[in-house]
Amino acid sequence: MSAQHRRVVVTGIGVVAPGSMGREGFWDMITAGRTATRRITFFDPARFRSQVAAEVDFDGVKLGLTAQEVFRNDRFVQMAMVAADEAVADSGLAFGADGGPDPDRVGVTLGSAVGATMRLEQEYVQVSDAGRLWEVDPRYASRFLASALVPSCGATELAVRFGAHGPATVVSTGCTSGIDSVGYGAQLVEDGDADVVLAGASDAPISPISMACFDTIRATTDTNDDPEHASKPFDARRNGFVMGEGSAVLVLEELEHARARGAEVYCEVTGYASRCNAFHMTGLKPDGREMAEAITVALGQGRIDSDEVGYVNAHGSGTKQNDRHETAAVKRSLGPAAGRVAMSSIKSMVGHSLGAIGSIEVAATALAVNRGVLPPTANYEVPDPECDLDYIPKVAREQKVDVAISVGSGFGGFQSAIVLASATRRAS
């Protein structure tokens, strides 16, 4: 089969998300419209403007990691390992066993916006004696500090864990890292560089330094007295995003490779595109032109018309400018069909885990296409005249969808879109 005809499908999904654990717990939570946002418990947040977050109740050892794996890896790597374990088990692939995939044909693409933030901050506190020493004392640093400095430690751990000898890559494009890593992984399969790719993202940014950074630019919400309802994408009362954390990993597989082993298929990845607005580090133009271009190109790769789109999993961060920009982008790219398309933001329930959220949202979109249920936008109650599409308020919707889009927007001007289609949409 020639490379240009290689099709990519999703055969495994693993999720570590706030308020739940595992793929099914995550799906049950978001389709029930439950929120996982709460006052920060990892440290005393009293000195910060934004004091709420969507934390994961995560214990690596209880979830199957060894004590040594927990000791040497930052939280973001641990969550990626747990998500990947679930995705691989779900796929039915027997890595390292007879009949398993050729190790040279297995790749890894892992996205992360901020890498080992928590580990680096904790190490600095130790070597500086909580900031008391200007000249830090290296005797108090962990021997694994060097690996924490580079985000590649995540991809390395997954490659070693599953014996993947193919391409191993870290994608760090801010808040679009999760979509971009899945999109790049799909391209590796399409181009014939791999038959199987473990693709996803992970971030654990709920730390004092991260909260301080977003406080400074007032990107996060200050609705501290009602954490459960603090994340309100597209609602007229929205005032910033809720920080989150988590990971999702998908098993991407060449279609014929999956068929040959009788694998269950969630959906097909039919297109992916990314653009940059080259405009402002944090600002967005209200016309949404670059996101619209990414959507249009991604649809075109699968020869899909705009009126075939049934669902858009929105970036939906809950900031004034993002939600307005994204609404305009969907209208610009889908035209008259935009008014008929269902759209929602799961950040209303699991917060914004920076680079990880894109892969978590792709996982949610794949499950929506596969199961015919569209997760809602929790806390959406007061319409904004500038955001006038169908945002599936508060209650999930049973609706068969053959084509869905997941979009992302990131600081630096990154705008990405990935298109997922039902496995039964095309016969061959």
Image (cartoon, grey):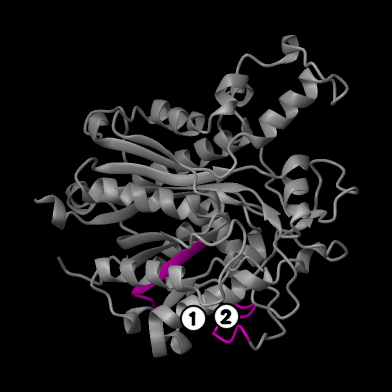
Question: Which residue is at 47% across, 28% downward?
Answer: 157
Residue carrying label 2: 392
Q: Which mark is residue 262?
A: none
Is disc 1 placed on a helix, strand or loop?
A: strand
| Image marks 1 and 2: residues in contact by CB distance under 8 Å | yes
Position of residue 404 relative to residue 82, above or below, is: below
Q: Is residue 296 visible?
A: yes
Q: Position of residue 354 (x, y in %)?
A: 60, 51
Q: Amino acid at mark 1?
A: Ala
Could you tell me which quadrant the C terminus lies in?
Answer: bottom left
Range of residues picked out in magenta: 386-408
Q: Position of residue 155 (x, y in %)?
A: 44, 33
| Residue farthest toward the front in the current orientation of the protein | 279
Residue 396 magenta? yes
Residue carrying label 1: 342
Answer with left or right where residue 354 lies relative to residue 160: right
Question: Which residue is at 29% across, 56% downward?
Answer: 9
Residue 363 magenta? no
In primary-sequence order, the first of circles 1 and 2 is: 1
